[in-house]
Image (spheres, rainbow, N blue to C red):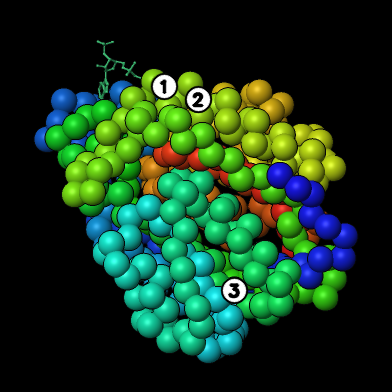
């Protein structure tokens, strides 16, 4: 991937919001209907509970509305909506069109489907729109995986859930927050994680695990190289929340201590496109980020896709 040219029009976050599925489902709840147990799920995945329910548009509107309120801007001021989702509410139109209407936006809107790498793909695209002249872009990552999960399949039912995270990105006069980025895909691996139209998620968990660590590390290293920073410069790593063991293996290989990782998987499960914004804005809300901190976002997902970005934290 190319490096960001000098003097490009930069952008920074000015507001964010998050939303989770309406109903909380604990590991114990799952053990009442499938052959699993709380101890196995916690130890093998790091998940304690998840939240399911709500459509992709509904959750997107909830997080998007909060992001607009925090940024203090009116819906009609947004120049573009980019919605990352792998679970659109309809095949046609794009769910971003529904969200555009419900939020009262007056701008172009499109979906990005890069599975669990989706938010980083959308964020890089949003920075590109601002580089091309847009002033304010709303970026949302939402997935409602509960709708495509077979709740009788213990291989997948323990992992997936629903959530949304949104951010307002605004053009800034000074340097922008995006220092380096990388978007990857290896379509030859599509058969290890997929969902046919009208079907449920099918997954070779071991193979996904094996590849995930490798592609996360590879993508993160490319972004850091493009940004001209070392792993030791990173204040916070925000990995896709798929399995705590994948996160810890990736952190170990990147030589970034786990204490620097943003973790919400215990409470959220795997929410695909929502997982990185949920973890990032949870860390921000908890005061874990100071202006100038370097943040490494890194996702992977079906495709298989991978995506990463190095951001310099600091709202406008
Ligand atoms: N509850 C209880 N036992 C379970 C179980 C469950 N939900 N699922 C599998 N088991 C059992 C298996 O049958 C096996 O039993 P055995 O040893 O008697 O044969 C044992 O637990 C170990 O199973 P295994 O499949 O080796 O577990 P694992 O450590 O590979 O963990 C995953 C399974 C799915 C949690 C793990 O492979 C994973 O997270 N993979 C990546 C998936 C992912 O990230 N997908 C989304 C990508 S965006």
Report which quarter residue 78 is drawn in: bottom right
Residue visible at 51% across and 73% down in the picture: 81
Where is residue 287? Give x, y as percent.
65, 57
- In the displayed structure, 245 sits above or below 232; it is above
Residue that label 2 marks: 211
**Labelled disc at residue 137:** 3
3 and 2 marks in contact (CB < 8 Å)? no
Image quarter (top left, top right, bottom left or bottom right) of the C terminus:
bottom right
Residue visible at 47% across and 58% down in the picture: 112
Please indicate whether residue 170 sits to the left or right of residue 60 in the image: right
Mark 3 CB within 8 Å of ligand 1: no
2 and 1 marks in contact (CB < 8 Å)? yes
Where is residue 284? Give x, y as percent.
62, 58
Please indicate whether residue 95 sits to the left or right of residue 81 in the image: left
**Labelled disc at residue 207:** 1
Let me know if residue 96 appears in the view. yes
């Amino acid at each position: 991937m190319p490096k960001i040219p000098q003097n490009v029009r930069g952008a920074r976050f000015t507001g964010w919001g998050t939303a989770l599925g309406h109903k909380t489902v604990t590991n114990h709840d799952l053990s009442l209907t499938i052959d699993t147990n709380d101890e196995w799920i916690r130890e093998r995945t790091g998940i304690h509970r998840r939240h399911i329910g709500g459509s992709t548009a509904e959750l997107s509107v909830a997080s998007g509305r909060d992001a607009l309120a925090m940024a203090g801007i009116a819906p009609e001021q947004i120049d573009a909506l980019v919605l990352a989702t792998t679970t659109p509410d309809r095949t046609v139109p794009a769910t971003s069109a529904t969200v555009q209407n419900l939020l009262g936006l007056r701008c172009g809107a499109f979906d990005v489907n890069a599975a669990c790498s989706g938010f980083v793909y959308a964020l890089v695209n949003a920075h590109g729109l601002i580089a091309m002249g847009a002033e304010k872009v709303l970026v949302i990552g939402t997935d409602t995986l509960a709708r495509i999960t077979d709740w009788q399949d213990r291989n997948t039912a323990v992992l997936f859930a629903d959530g949304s995270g949104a951010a307002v990105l605004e053009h800034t006069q000074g340097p922008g927050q995006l220092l380096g980025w990388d978007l990857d895909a290896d379509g030859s691996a599509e058969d290890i994680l997929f969902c046919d139209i009208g079907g449920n998620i099918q997954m070779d968990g071991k193979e996904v695990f094996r590849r995930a660590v490798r592609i996360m590390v590879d993508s993160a290293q490319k972004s850091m190289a493009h940004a001209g920073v070392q792993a030791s410069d990173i204040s916070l790593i925000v990995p896709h929340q798929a399995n705590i063991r994948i996160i810890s293996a990736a952190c170990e290989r990147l030589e970034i201590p786990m204490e620097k990782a943003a973790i919400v998987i215990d409470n959220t499960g795997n929410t695909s496109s929502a997982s990185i914004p949920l973890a990032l804005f949870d860390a921000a809300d908890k005061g874990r980020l100071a202006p100038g901190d370097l943040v490494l976002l890194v996702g992977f997902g079906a495709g298989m896709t991978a995506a990463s970005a190095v951001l310099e934290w600091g709202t406008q």
